[in-house]
Image (cartoon, grey):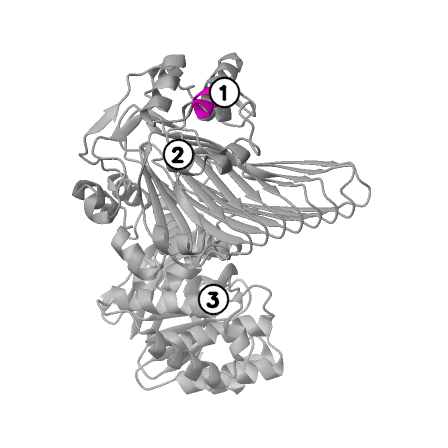
């Protein structure tokens, strides 16, 4: 699904990623942990196609295609999804309208017809139920006045609607209380399948109590310093990052 | 590689103003220039009674002594008033009893505009009066309306058929000498729409007028007069387009609304005159005077979507003369490239317990300048008058400007006036967020702008709202920067 080889990335001439390697297969959940400033969010932004970052060396191969030259929307339309750490507000545009526009853009990019309104509505209801989202929530302006938990739940709702092949969850657990964390994690677990892959980027271990990763990687100073299974996450929680 | 700004710009330069075509209809056009003889000739051409000719002449005399105002926040080369032709009419028969008699070329024009009369008839039940260049071409649904006693016709026809009403109300809200352009309009107006809703009648359909300038080197001076008698209701729509031309065309209309006791008038405009090309060449000068007079317990609501014209200069206003009367102004003004807009409203509170609401959304892109200018005046006797104003500006790129000039004059201590204003920029983070969901940048901007304008778009009648949304998208294409 995703092969990252010797990736070097800079922003404003500052080197952030310095030779990162990562291999993610369909059906897998990977957790990337690391201290602040280790390059976690840079990694997610680069995969999503944020042009503020410059790839100076290495490659990102997604479904056997080098995606370096693809725009963010092209990547999205090929099935890459990122749950934002800080989702933005778009006043006046409802959650429903936004997701409808996104889905139809995806379909159009894939040469398919727009989704019929009744089908859309059915899907929205189904996914909203999955994530315990109230229908009133769907007619509010996108992220405007949302609590931290609502924003994150909305991100996962969009993920459920768009059904990506590769989902990157950037610090999805930050700002969530324990109930919201449980709902978000349950949602992710239900969306998870053998044909998609999830990369969880997190500072803390607690989300991994609910979503069990197949692999845990420690990112330090722009590189993967250590990889292991979920036990590694517990170890990190206990000992911190310094022992690596 | 990601779609660069350069590529985007190139692509957009190739996109033309959608409505920029001319129609091959023979026109009868007066020689250029303006003097008493031309005014007389216009009046004569229209078989007007003497009182009307005299009215025009006195307006002309006033205009001659007036100077073109300069206080607005716009820069343009002043029109040479002696180089304009003041009358142009499609040469075919000017009045039609049914659509079958209308020149097929003309009907094709309407098709191109996407407002096929036929379709309009079927779909929305909208009665349409179309003013092309200067002459009113067709008024549909006249019969249906006349059963309710509603008069909806061209102003020329009204002068012939309903002189008492015209005499009684014409120039009462906007006097001939009100301003330079209203005086000019009063002297030379060629046609326009007239509407009268009798006492207690709710007009059963939207009334609509389409204006189009077609002939080169002409100005367009329509005159609209809407009278809602006691307890009546009408919703009136007005749409405008013009072909692309290198020279500037002048459009100086006058719209007067009269809402008698307990009446309500909703007046919506979608203005899409040719804005000029990417370098700012050509485009329509849109210098329009619009004002409504509210009697007791009446309400006038102006809604406008202004996307076209090189220069827009207009302030649809309400005089809240009657007690408990209500004035509303909802506006979206979009400027792109070199367009300039100085628009807003005046709410003049004279009666007791009068209320006004102003919601203005300005969107500037390219190298354009967009100003909101508004006056809220509370008179001595306007006990408990209330006003709420909200002016929001959205900027795109670093080369455009947004300005707000709110004037408030309160002469009564019981007045409550609220004013809110915001200025924001479309954020790169907002666009990236949309991109990440598969929405391209153009579409993302359209989405953000529609969200920003929603409060005003919601005020438009349904069919118009859809058209207005599309217009917003078209007007802002190429503004990413």
Against B217, residue B342 (above or below) is below
Label 3, residues with CA under 10 Å away: few <14, some 14-19, many ≥20: many
Residue B125 image position (x, y, % from top left): 36, 58
Does any portion of residue A15 appear in the rendered image?
no
Q: Is residue B51 part of the magenta span, yes or no?
A: yes
The residue range painted magenta reads B50-55
Disc number lying in front (2 or 1): 2
Does any portion of residue B142 appear in the rendered image?
yes
Give the secondary structure at mark 2. helix
Give the secondary structure at mark 3. helix
Residue B148 image position (x, y, % from top left): 44, 56
Q: Are marks 1 and 3 on the same chain?
A: no
Q: CA distance from mark 1 to mark 3?
A: 73 Å
Q: CA distance from mark 2 to mark 3?
A: 78 Å
Residue at the spot of label 1: B59
Q: Earlier in the sequence, mark 2 or mark 1?
A: 1
Q: Main secondary structure of the magenta part?
A: helix
Numbered badge on residue A40: 3
Residue A122 image position (x, y, % from top left): 38, 81
Against A85, residue A56 (above or below) is above
Label 1, residues with CA under 10 Å away: few <14, some 14-19, many ≥20: many
The answer to whether the residues at label 2 and label 1 have Cβ atoms under 8 Å apart is no
Residue A114 image position (x, y, % from top left): 28, 69
Label 2, residues with CA under 10 Å away: few <14, some 14-19, many ≥20: some
Residue at the spot of label 2: B160
Pinpoint the chain carrying mark 1: B
Q: Residue at x 37, y 37 (%)?
A: B157
Pinpoint the chain carrying mark 2: B
Which quadrant of the view contains residue B294? Answer: top right
């Amino acid at each position: 699904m995703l092969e990252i080889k010797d990736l070097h990335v800079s922003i404003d001439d500052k080197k952030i990623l310095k030779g990162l390697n990562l291999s993610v297969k369909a059906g897998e959940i990977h957790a990337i942990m690391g201290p602040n400033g280790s390059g976690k969010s840079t990694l997610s932004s680069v995969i999503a196609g944020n042009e503020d970052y410059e790839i100076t060396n290495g490659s990102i191969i997604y479904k056997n295609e080098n995606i370096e030259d693809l725009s963010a929307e092209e990547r999205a339309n090929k099935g890459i999804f990122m749950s934002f750490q800080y989702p933005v507000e778009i006043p006046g545009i409802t959650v429903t309208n936004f997701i409808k526009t996104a889905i139809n853009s995806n379909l159009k990019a894939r040469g398919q017809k727009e989704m019929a309104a009744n089908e859309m509505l059915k899907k929205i209801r189904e996914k909203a139920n999955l994530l315990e989202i109230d229908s009133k929530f769907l007619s509010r302006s996108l992220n405007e006045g949302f609590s931290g938990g609502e924003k994150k739940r909305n991100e996962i709702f969009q993920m459920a609607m768009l059904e990506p092949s590769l989902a990157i969850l950037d610090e999805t657990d930050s700002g969530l209380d324990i109930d919201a964390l449980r709902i978000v994690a349950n949602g992710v677990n239900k969306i998870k399948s053998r044909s998609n892959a999830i990369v969880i980027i997190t500072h803390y271990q607690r989300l991994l109590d609910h979503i069990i990763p197949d692999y845990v990687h420690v990112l330090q100073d722009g590189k993967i310093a250590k990889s292991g299974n979920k036990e590694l996450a517990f170890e990190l929680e206990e000992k911190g990052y310094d022992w690596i | 590689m990601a779609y660069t700004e350069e590529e985007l710009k190139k692509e957009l330069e190739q996109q033309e103003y959608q409505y920029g075509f001319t129609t091959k209809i023979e026109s009868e056009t007066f020689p250029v220039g303006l003097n008493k003889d031309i005014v007389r000739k216009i009046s004569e051409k229209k078989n007007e009674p003497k009182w009307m000719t005299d009215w025009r002449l006195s307006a002309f005399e006033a205009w001659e002594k007036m100077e073109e105002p300069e206080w607005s926040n716009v820069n343009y080369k002043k029109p040479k008033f002696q180089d304009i032709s003041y009358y142009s009419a499609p040469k075919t028969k000017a009045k039609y009893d049914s659509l079958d008699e209308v020149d097929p070329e003309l009907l094709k024009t309407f098709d191109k505009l996407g407002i096929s009369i036929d379709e309009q008839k079927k779909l929305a039940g909208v009665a349409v009066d179309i003013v092309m260049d200067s002459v009113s071409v067709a008024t549909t649904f006249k019969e249906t309306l006349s059963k309710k006693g509603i008069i909806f016709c061209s102003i020329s026809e009204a002068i012939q058929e309903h002189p008492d009403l015209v005499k009684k109300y014409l120039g009462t809200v906007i006097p001939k000498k009100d301003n330079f352009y209203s005086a000019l309009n009063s002297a030379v107006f060629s046609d326009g729409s007239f509407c009268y809703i009798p006492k207690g009648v709710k007009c059963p359909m939207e009334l609509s007028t389409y204006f189009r300038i077609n002939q080169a080197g002409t100005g367009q001076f329509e005159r609209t007069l809407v009278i809602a008698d006691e307890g009546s209701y009408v919703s009136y729509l007005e749409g405008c387009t013009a072909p692309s031309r290198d020279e500037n065309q002048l459009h100086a209309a006058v719209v007067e609304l009269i809402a008698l006791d307990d009446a309500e008038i909703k007046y919506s405009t979608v203005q899409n005159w040719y804005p000029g090309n990417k370098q700012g060449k050509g485009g329509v000068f849109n210098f329009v005077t619009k004002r409504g007079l509210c009697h007791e317990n009446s309400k006038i609501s102006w809604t406008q979507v202004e996307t076209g014209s090189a220069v827009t200069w207009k302030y649809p206003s309400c005089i809240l003369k009657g007690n408990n009367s209500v004035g509303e102004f909802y506006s979206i003004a979009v400027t792109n490239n070199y367009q300039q807009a100085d628009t807003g409203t005046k709410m003049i509170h004279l009666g007791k317990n009068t209320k006004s609401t102003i919601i203005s959304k300005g969107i500037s892109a390219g190298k354009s300048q967009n100003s909101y200018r508004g006056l809220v005046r509370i008179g001595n006797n306007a006990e408990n008058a209330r006003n709420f104003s909200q002016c929001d500006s959205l900027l795109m790129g670093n080369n455009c400007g947004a300005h707000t000039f709110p004037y408030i004059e309160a002469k009564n201590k019981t007045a409550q006036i609220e004013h809110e204003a915001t200025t924001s920029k479309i954020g790169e983070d907002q666009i990236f967020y949309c991109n990440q969901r598969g929405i391209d940048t153009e579409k993302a901007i359209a989405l953000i702008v529609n969200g920003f304008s929603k409060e005003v778009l919601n005020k438009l009648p349904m069919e118009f709202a859809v058209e207005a949304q599309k217009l917003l998208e078209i007007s802002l294409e190429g503004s990413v920067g």
